[in-house]
Amino acid sequence: MIRAVSGTRDILPAEVSAWHRVESAARSLFARYGYREIRTPIFEETALFARGIGAETDIVSKEMYTFEDRDGSSLTLRPEATAGIVRSVIENNLMNTDPALKVYALGPMFRRERPQKGRYRQFHQVDVEAFGFAGPGIDAEIIEVALGYLEACGLVEVDLVLNSVGDPACRPAYVETLRAALRANLAKLGPDSQRRTETNPLRVLDSKAPEEQGLIAALPRIADHLCPACREHFGEVRRQLDLVGIRYRVDHRLVRGLDYYTRTTFEVTSGALGAQNSLLGGGRYDGLVKELGGPDLCGIGFAVGMERVIMTLPAAEGERRCDVFLMPLGAAAQDKALRLQRALRGAGVRVLLDPEGRSFKARMKLADKLGARFVAILGEDEIQKGAWTVRDMAGSAQEDVPEARVLDHLKEKIHG
Ligand code: AMP
C-alpha cells in the first residue's frame, strides 16, 4: 500500500470547513485594509530563494526541495512566499501602477524539516506583504492586521513579541560587539553557536540549546545599539500599538539574521500549541527588493501557519451537508424524485437522495447523519394522494404537500 509522504497530510472532507473559514476570514479582513490577492507559482528558480532567504539559513542550506529540470535548470518548490512575491512585483513592475502596494497570498509551502505535531514538510501559509511604505505606521498597521486575522479566525489568547534589528547604519557595529562577547565565551557554546559566532552571530540569539540560555540572556542587546533613526522608528511603532491598545513584549532575541531585514521584527505565539508554538512571524525587509534586482523599494510582511491556526481552533460542530433528503419508495416515485431533485438543485437547495434505495429505516438514519432539515417521502400512499409527505427533522412534524407545490414549498422552507 502506498501512503502519504512523511510530513505531508490529507485535508479530509470533514476538516475542510475549518479551512474555508480561515481562508474566507483572510479574504474579508485583508480587503478592509486594502490588500489584494496575488497568486505566484509553486516552483521558482532555485537562485531566487538562495538570494531571497539567504544561503546561510537552515531553509536554504538544508530544507529545500530542489530538483533539476529536464533542461538542466535548478528549480525549487517554494519554502515561503515572500521571495516569489517580490520577484513578481519586480517582473511585472507592480509598483509603477501601485506605488503603495498591498498584497496577500494563500497556499502550500515546502520545507524538508523533521516532521512532528504542527511541523510538516508541506504546510500552508497566509502571507501578507506591503511595499513602498517607509514610515512606522505600516509596521503598526500590519501587526494589527496579523492579530485581527487571528481574532477573526477565533483566536484571542495569543502573545505578541516585538523587536527592532536595526539597519545597515547601526547593525554592523552591534554585530561586532555581539561577536566579541561571544568569542569571549566560546567555551560555553555548542558547536553550532561557535560556528555562527563567526558566520552570523545574530543567529546565536535564536539558539534553543538549554546550556546556552544563561549566556544569551546576558549578551549585549540590539536595543542599546540602535541608531537614532531606528530608535525613533521603533519608538513610534510601539507608540502606535499602545494607542490602539495592542499588547506586546519586547524580546531582544527576536532577530532575522540577514542584512536585508531591517528594523521591526515580530512573532505571535499561542500557549495552546505546545513545542511548535509560533503562529506567525514577520518583519520589515527594506533591502530585499533591491537585492533581488528591483528598485530600492522597502517592504514589510508576515506569514501565518494555517495548520497551526486550525489546530488551535475549537472543533466545529457537526456540519449540515444537505437541506433536503428525498425518500422515494418504488420505481414510479424514484423517477419523480429524480426530477424534483434536479429542480431543487437548480433553485440552489442542497439536496440528496440515496441512489442505492436502502430500507426506509437506513435512509432515515442517513438523512439524520447528513444533517437534513427536511425529508420528503413519496411512497404508494403518497402517490395515491398526489402529495409528498414532508417531515421537519427538527420537531418531527409532518405535512402533506401536493406534488405541484412541493418544489416551491421546499424552496420557501429553505430560503425563506
Ligand atoms: P516562517 O516562514 O518560518 O517565518 O514561518 C511562519 C509561520 O509558518 C510559523 O509561525 C508557523 O506557523 C508556520 N510554519 C513554518 N514552518 C512550518 C512547518 N514546517 N509546518 C507547519 N507550519 C509551519
Image (tube, rainbow, N blue to C red):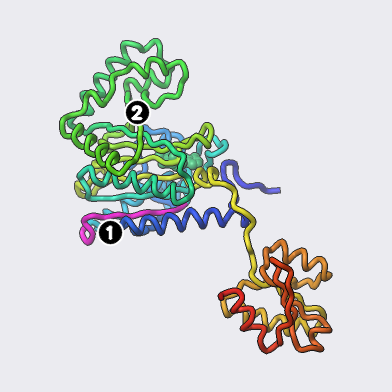
Asked whether, in this view, residue 173 is left or right of residue 55, the answer is: left
- The amino acid on which the numbered mark 1 sits, given as a three-letter code, is Asn
Q: Which residue is label 1 attached to? A: 92
Closer to the camera in the image, 304 or 124: 304
Q: Give the residues drawn in magenta, as a range.
A: 96-107
Of callouts 2 and 1, which one flags the residue occurring earlier in the amino acid sequence? 1
How would you rate the neighbour count of disc 2 (Cα within 10 Å): few for under 14, some for 14-19, many for 20 or more?
Answer: some
Q: Dot 1 surroundings within 10 Å: few (below 14), some, or many (20 or more)?
A: few
- Residue 7 versus residue 182 in the image, above or below: below
- Pick the front one: 416 or 218: 416
Residue 47 located left or right of residue 310 = left
Circle 2 residue: 251
Q: Secondary structure at mark 1?
A: loop
Residue 358 falls inside the magenta stretch = no
The x, y position of residue 53, in whole percent, is 35, 40
- The amino acid marked with disc number 2 is Asp
**Residue 112 location (% of width, % of height):** 50, 39
